[in-house]
Amino acid sequence: MARWLANMVGEPVPENTWSETVAWAKANPEPLARLIQHANGAFQNEQCFGLIGFDALDRTSSDWARMDGIVRDLPKVVLWLKPYSNLHAKAFLREDQSDRRYASIYARPTQGGAWSPDLRGECLILT
């Protein structure tokens, strides 16, 4: 996400390896926040939206425990973008990935069949 946003607004983010980008994001939360604010402002000025999709999460790692951690933490990333009017994220999870032992933030179907957040937060989980 940081790499894509940095490319969109012309800001530098380490791109040599995935580990390097993750380490930069962990070590630089304020520059990362400024990057997201800058990207949101750029999208507002252009009157367009950035949609970041997360799919095929089973391919993020060959270690199932690590993949489960990624799936569990993904709703935090989606919720992190919530305050930004022109940045949105969608996460596509299989039913087994959204099982309660993996994710702690769920949407639930209402009586009419639409999805709404439960009392713990908001997150789109599409199966």
Image (cartoon, rainbow, N blue to C red):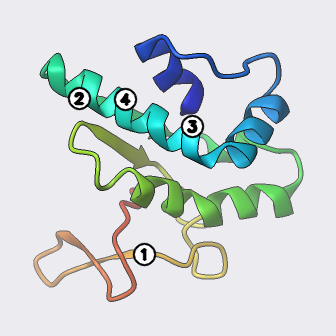
In-front residue for pair 29/125: 29
Q: Secondary structure at mark 4?
A: helix
Residue under numbered circle 4: 38
Counting residues from the N terminus, which is met first, the one under dot 1 or under dot 4?
4
Between 23 and 110, which is closer to the camera in this rendering? 23
Which dot, 3 or 2, sits closer to the camera?
A: 3
Cβ atoms at labels 1 and 4 below 8 Å apart: no
Which residue is at a point 21% across and 44% down the rendered structure image?
Answer: 85
Q: Residues within 10 Å of mark 4 (few under 14, many from 20)?
A: some
Residue identifier under label 3: 31
| Depth order, front residue of 58/11 | 11
Q: Amino acid at mark 3?
A: Pro
From the top left corner, tell me how far across and down residue 17 is, in percent: 82, 23
Tell me the element at label 3: helix
Mark sitting on residue 49? 2
| Residue under numbered circle 1 | 106
Q: CA distance from mark 1 to mark 4?
A: 29 Å
> Is the Cβ of the residue at disc 4 closer than 8 Å to that at disc 2?
no
**Which of the two labelled residues, at mark 3 and mark 1, occupies the earlier sequence position?**
3
Mark sitting earlier along the chain (4/2): 4
Please give left or right for residue 80 compared with residue 71 in the image.
left
Check whether the beta carbons of the residues at disc 3 and disc 4 lie within 8 A of each other: no
- Could you say which quadrant of the image residue 115 lies in? bottom left
Q: Is residue 14 above or below residue 87?
A: above
Q: Secondary structure at mark 2?
A: loop
Q: Which residue is depicted at the point 47% across and 32% down?
A: 35
